Amino acid sequence: MLDPKTLTSNQKFLLNLTIPALYLFPLLVVFFLPKNFGFGNHDLVPIGLTVGIFGLTMWIAGMACLGKSLAVLPGASSIVARGVYRFVRHPIYVGIVLTQLGLFSACGSVFGMIYLFVLVIPLNVIRARMEEQALLTKFGDRYRIYRDSTWF
């Protein structure tokens, strides 16, 4: 696995640009592609938009709760257990997935759905595992107790 401590400053800079771009890229592509709203089922559009708005809200709430602990690369500066983090350990990742799932469903984007399931979800799972390992290494039982009391 990638260890942020062993990366050069140029590698960290590149990853700090690349990872967020991987989340933005499919949104831009889907925006410009032809739409098949709700995959032909127009009842799916408001459901998708609702899921997307909920995901975006969770994403933003997670970022707000992290404050100065927010970073693109996995690290372990503190255990944040306030706000949405009382219930979910990785609300930003869950929020990203729900935002994209909802928007791609509403737009009826096969490309977006494939991108989400092939790249975004696996990337988020890998990042979550790396963060969890860093937190376990630094905080041990304190983190285990927190982890056991929350969902993903």
Image: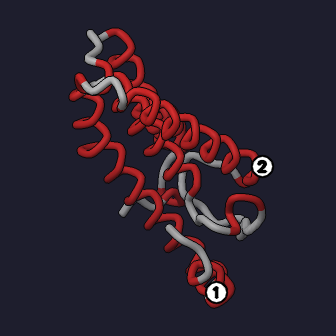
Residue 141 vertical position relative to residue 152 in the rendered view, above or below: below
Identify the element where label 1 is drawn.
Answer: helix
Task: Give me the C-alpha separation between circle 1 and circle 2.
Answer: 22 Å
Q: Label 1: which residue?
A: 145
Three-letter residue code for mark 1: Ile
Residue 77: give x, y in percent of width and height: 71, 64
Bin the neighbour count of mark 2 within 10 Å (Cα to Cα): few under 14, some 14-19, many 20 and up: few
**Foreground residue, 24 or 136?**
24
User: What colour scheme was applied to this rendering of the protein?
Assistant: secondary structure
Bin the neighbour count of mark 1 within 10 Å (Cα to Cα): few under 14, some 14-19, many 20 and up: few
Residue 28 vertical position relative to residue 57 in the rendered view, above or below: above
Q: Label 2: which residue?
A: 67
Residue 139: give x, y in percent of width and height: 66, 81
- Is residue 8 something one can see in this rendering? yes
Residue 110: give x, y in percent of width and height: 21, 29
Residue 26: give x, y in percent of width and height: 35, 26
Whether residue 83 sits left or right of residue 131 in the image: it is right
Q: State the image quarter where residue 75 is shown.
A: bottom right
Residue at image location 57% in from the left, 35% down from the top: 53
